[in-house]
Every structure is written in structure tokens, then in C-alpha cells.
Amino acid sequence: MTAVITQDVPLVDLRAQYATIRDEVRKAIDEVLESMQLTIGPNVRAFDEEFARYIGAKHAVGVGSGTDALQLAIRACGVSSGDEVITVSFTFFATVEAILYANARPILVEIDEETMLMDTSAVAAAITPRTKAIIPVHLYGRTVDLRPLRQIAQDRNITIIEDAAQAHGALLDDGKKAGNGGRVNCFSFYCSKNLGAYGEAGSITTNDDRLAEELRALREHGQSTRYYHPVVGYNARLDEIQAAILRIKLRKLPEWNARRREIARIYDRLLQGTGIRVPQIPPGERHVFYVYCIRVPGGRRDALRGFLADRGIGTQIHYPVPIHLQQSAEFLGYRKGDLPITERFADEVLSIPMYPELTDEQIDRVTTSIREFAKSH
Ligand SMILES: Cc1ncc(COP(=O)(O)O)c(C=O)c1O
């Protein structure tokens, strides 16, 4: 009898994606190396234009990472020492790190039980005269409804900065893409993202000409022309090799996002009746499923994680410790119990394999294993 060899199912399989674009990527890298224009050059300029066009924004400014994007955006919006910036505790650490870089105070608010995103009523309650900005995070690829935030920010001179690091191509409530919702908006091209570089990269989008110019200066040591530095900036450049790779991948993004949404719908169907909470799928394209996150109540999350690991199925916890309970954030004065929904979700969430190249057989393996677990636990 021949043994059936079933492949493992990783959380993300970057090699599977690379196999589909290998020739194009190698050629593009080779061209950059032959030209030896390694930093801001033709590919960065072209990618900035192409990404702005894709997002539907007037400008995109490529930078070295999503964290750079947040740091520069916060600075360009005039946030400084003593200001307060409202965001969520249920996010990747960099959202809050970037606020701290500006010596501003992060005010961390609760998330909504259904969407797992910023609770806008909690934002309204957190506004003070020192509030300078609000950073909604489109976590997992699902966009925050910005309408109530705009209402809150209006007339108070509060800036909205989208953290769209996980939401390339996701639509906002007004039908525009994430990246148009705030005064400046931030993307990460970390390797595992829906649009991921083969190294570090990020981008800031804006419709404001003056801010775009300022951001372009900030990414290169604050220089206006070479070696003239009217302001102190950063080394936050996007490099030519990453830009050349991102240009290739950007062309595939709509197709890849569509497949992610298709996989989410299959998961949704096959995980019904297991007692495991699956994410809501909002209508249209408001979710691009950077992460497909299930919730496992009753203290069984880690058991399921182990059960899946034994069957060669990769998972991750996004994120196990909310920001307000991180050791480095102790000085902010938050305590356990301050954000109960956030804290409960940190104990329940589990991200299961999600990437466009996931095969139907792999999806079946994941869902069959989860159903098996649910029956026996
Ligand atoms: C929500 C969020 N914000 C910010 C970042 C920071 O991006 P980067 O890792 O590119 O610095 C990330 C990505 O890792 C993220 O997921």
C-alpha cells in the first residue's frame, strides 16, 4: 500500500507565493543591481505613483517600514510632547511605539465585541483637550468604520491617522480604499503582509500636497535638496530592490485578496457548528483577511493550538499580550481588568493558515482537524 503523504499547512507560505513570481522578481532584482541605483530612484518613484493610484490617494511616500510610516505620519501631523493619541490596545506593538517616539501619551481604548476593532464610543469618552490624533487600526485586514470617528474629530482639530498596515486593498465605509480615511495613512510591507516586501518596507498615503512634500523630506534626513536640511528628519528610505519587488507584487494584489476572501468564506462554511467563533465577513470588500482569526472560548485555545501543531498545521496568536499589559508600557499606569474585552480576546484568539496559495486540500485538512478537536473537547 502506498502511504498518503500530506503536506504540512504553515500559517503563511511565502515560498509558495515566490514560486509564482520567481522569474519576474529575479529579473527585477538583477536590473536594480546592474543599474546600481540602490536607494530612492526609478523604482521607488514608480512604486510611489503606482501604490498611490491603487489606493486612490494623491500621494504615496515609500518608507523603510510600517513603523517608519507611523513615526513620520505622527510627526508630520504635529503630534509632540504631552499630546494624547487615542488608539487600541489590541494591535501590534508598533502602533503604540510610534506614539511614544513622539513623546506623546497613548490613550488605549476598548474594542468592539463583534468587529474586534476600535470601539468608537470608547473613543468619544476618551477625548480630552490634549487629544491630538486618533489612530484606528484596521486589524486583521478589516476596516474600522471611520464615520463616527470623523464626527468626533470634526471641529476639535483632531487628526485621524489610519494604521492600515494590515489592510492593503480593503474598502472603507465610503467605498474608497483604506489609505484615504485619515489625513495621513500608514502601510507596512512586512514580508507576511498581503503586499509584502522581501525585506522591510512601508508607505504613507495622503491627499495633502504639503504633507506629502514634508514626508518626502522627513524620509531622507529632512533634506529639501541634497545636503540641505531645513528640518531634522530620519533615515527612513525605501530601497530600490524592495520597490522593484513591490511593483511586481502590487499587480497581483487584487487577485490575491480575492482568493483570501474566498478562503475566508470556505472556512466560515466549514467551521459552522463547531462552537468556535469565526470572524464576521462584512459585505463587499471591507475585509482582506491578512489574518483569519478564530476565537476559542472556555480556555481551550492553547489546547487547540497544540492539537493543530501535532497535525502539522501552523497557527499564531495575534496578539497574546495587549499593549496596556506589556512590561514596557507599565509606566502608562494601566492594570489588568482595565480593558476586559481586549484581555479576554487575547486569551481566545487564534490565527489559522491564510494565504492565497492555500489549496482546497489544505483548507480541508485545517477545518477537518478543528472539527475533530471540537468534537473531542
Ligand atoms: C497594525 C500594525 N501596525 C504597524 C506595523 C509595523 O509595521 P513594520 O513591521 O513594517 O514596521 C505592523 C506590522 O508589522 C502592524 O501589523
Image (cartoon, helix red, strand yellow):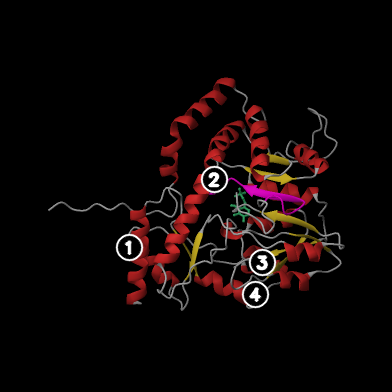
User: Which is more N-terminal, label 3 or label 4?
Assistant: 3
For the point 24% across and 52% down, the residue is 5
The segment highlighted magenta reads 179-195
Q: CA distance from mark 2 to mark 3?
A: 26 Å
Left or right: residue 199 versus residue 223 is: left
- Identified by mark 4, the residue type is Leu
Which dot, 2 or 3, sits closer to the camera? 2
Asked if the residue at label 1 sits under 8 Å from ligand 1, the reply is no
Q: CA distance from mark 4 to mark 3?
A: 12 Å
Task: List the residue tagged with mark 2.
Answer: 254
Asked if the residue at label 2 sits under 8 Å from ligand 1, the reply is no
User: Which is more N-terminal, label 3 or label 2?
Assistant: 3
Task: List the residue tagged with mark 4.
Answer: 339
Task: List the residue tagged with mark 1.
Answer: 310
In the rendered image, is residue 85 in sight? no
Q: Secondary structure under badge 3? A: loop
Task: List the residue tagged with mark 3.
Answer: 118
Q: Secondary structure under badge 4? A: loop
Q: Secondary structure under badge 1? A: helix
In the rendered image, is residue 124 in sight? yes
For the point 42% across and 60% down, the residue is 266
